[in-house]
Image (spheres, grey):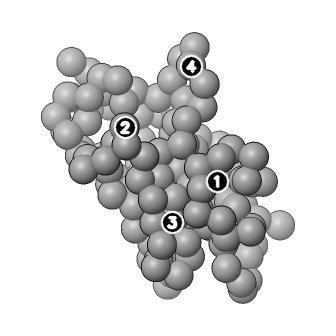
Amino acid sequence: EVQLVESGGGLVQAGGSLRLSCTVSGFTNGDYVIGWFRQAPGKAREGVSCISNSGGMRFVADSVQNRFTISIDNARNTVYLQMDSLQPEDTAVYYCAFNPNAQLMLSIRAYDTWGQGTQVTVSS
């Protein structure tokens, strides 16, 4: 059974940075994709970025292009989301999710396992 554990959220001032981590366990081999999503109060969950476990493919949504960077450390089974130049509109619960079909996409339906989420709050 695949399990995902996020960490790294918190409170930061506008213009600041945070790095989120997503540690994957329970998947022993094969190709997969890890995605980061976020959900602000009263809004739909939206895709932010995703990466293949080989690290060779990655995608970043236009809304966070040039500010967020996704990476993977396969030795630690951990995917990172480096978030720079944070703005109040980035405030949300951030989730990582597992796509067993290794499809590089941010469609929620492609992901079958989700972490518990970590809160990111950006103050103005």
Disc with the residue nearer the chain's start (4 vs 2): 4
Residue in view at x 26 percent, y 29 percent: 87
- Image coordinates of residue 42 in percent, x first then y, are 57, 14
Q: Quadrant of residue 35?
A: bottom right
Give me the C-alpha separation between circle 1 and circle 2.
19 Å
Residue in view at x 53 percent, y 81 percent: 54
Image depth: mark 3 or mark 1 in front = 3
Res 10 visible: no
- Image coordinates of residue 122 in percent, x first then y, are 30, 27
Up-down relation of residue 71 to residue 114 (above or below): below
Quadrant of the rendering where the N terminus is positioned = bottom right
Amino acid at circle 1: Ala
Q: Which mark is residue 51?
A: 3
Give me the C-alpha separation between circle 2 and circle 3.
17 Å
Image position of 61 (left or right of 100)? left
Residue to which mark 4 is pinned:
43
Q: Which residue lies most toward the top here?
A: 42
Give me the C-alpha separation between circle 4 and circle 2.
15 Å
Residue in view at x 54 percent, y 43 percent: 47
Task: Count numbered badges in the picture.
Answer: 4
In terms of depth relative to the viewer, which is nearer, 68 or 73? 68
Residue to which mark 2 is pinned:
63
Identify the element where label 4 is drawn.
loop
Up-down relation of residue 55 to residue 13 (above or below): below
Disc with the residue nearer the chain's start (4 vs 1): 4
Disc with the residue nearer the chain's start (3 vs 4): 4
Identify the element where label 2 is drawn.
helix
Disc with the residue nearer the chain's start (3 vs 1): 3
Image position of 54 (left or right of 2)? left
Q: Assess disc 2: are there few (<14), some (14-19) or many (≥20) residues with their C-alpha within 10 Å of its C-alpha.
A: few
Res 17 visible: yes
